[in-house]
Image (cartoon, helix red, strand yellow):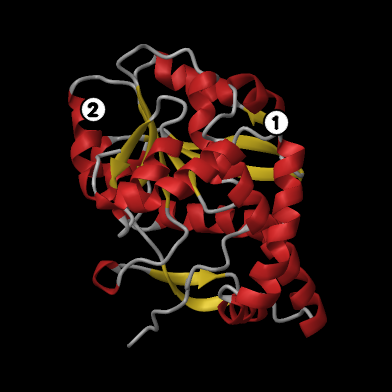
Amino acid sequence: MKFNKDNILYAPLYALLWVLALLPFWVLYLLGDILFFPLFYIVKYRRKLVFENMRASFPDLSDREVKRMEKKFYRHLCDYAVETVKLLHVSDRSVRKRFEMVNIELLQESVDNREQVILMLGHFGNWEYIPSIKIWLDAPEEAALGEVYRPLNNKWFDSFFLKLRSRFGTVNIPKRDVLREMIRYKRNNIPAVIGFMADQTPSRANIYYWTEFLNHKDTPVLTGIERIAKKLGCTLVYTDVIKVKRGYYKIVFEPITKNPSEYGDFELTEMYIRRMEKTIERAPEYWLWTHNRWKHKRLD
């Protein structure tokens, strides 16, 4: 991290997180259990928004059932937090033990063929570990394996999360640079597997398509994946995440297409949204409900 005032101010926090990351998972989960109570009952971090999002998304559930789901979500959020801190020290061996990569051979084949692959992801389970695909792939040194990210406003936290997300030697591409980088990979025949997360709301200026999502009839969705894939002929792969049990995940790579230009306008976006919806409905407590997903209303 660049040395500046923020580094001095946040140095104690970083030292604490660095020490916590040395603890075994079972101790971290105990700390997560302790963290749950002040987060849920005292701070009440975005609880009103979470309940409203869940209530509208699952109208057939009773308020009691929604509140039960809400509690499960906050417990998972605490698990996500301690698992993410663990990235500072987690070993490749531990990741291999806790994550099962299903159909990873599809990505290996694409890397061998020097293709540019877009992984269609969502904020589900613990997405911070998806870049660990590098330890499962036999890729040439020049290969670009990583993800697109939106820089955080707080420069210290932005640097901290970049450090975590680079743990496996993967690249992190700022959202504003992603098209330029993908074009560079294509022109230079560089194999690439890049994760794109498109389940959150676009800015008002970047809304080009509305659809139904989780019982919300007018939901604006990001369409950048489809536009980039069609422009560059990228291979599209949906990345499903299954939380098997606490601390253990199954990642399933589902091929979508190697020929995105063959699909009509927003057809690939719909395919992603429907798969993301199915993933969430299977275990809704593992999605990131604290995001204000439906803040934009259709004006026409």
Residue identifier under label 1: 98
Front-lying residue, 28 or 224:
28
Give the quarter of the figure containing the C terminus. Answer: bottom left
Q: Which mark is in front, 2 or 1?
A: 1
> In the rendered view, would you say 138 is above or below 270?
above
Three-letter code for the amino acid on which mark 2 is drawn: Lys
| x, y percent for residue 251 | 63, 36
Front-lying residue, 154 or 237:
154
> In the rendered view, would you say 61 is above or below 171?
below
Residue shown at 41%/24% (left/top)? 169
Q: Is residue 29 left or right of residue 53?
A: right
Q: CA distance from mark 2 to mark 1?
A: 33 Å
**Crowding at mark 2 (Cα within 10 Å: few <14, some 14-19, many 20+):** some
Q: Is residue 262 visible?
A: no
- Write down the quadrant of residue 223 in the picture: bottom left
Residue identifier under label 2: 186
- Write down the quadrant of residue 60 in the picture: bottom right
- Write down the quadrant of residue 91 in the picture: top right
Q: Secondary structure at mark 2?
A: helix
Three-letter code for the amino acid on which mark 1 is drawn: Arg
Q: Secondary structure at mark 1?
A: helix
Q: Is residue 216 left or right of residue 12?
A: right
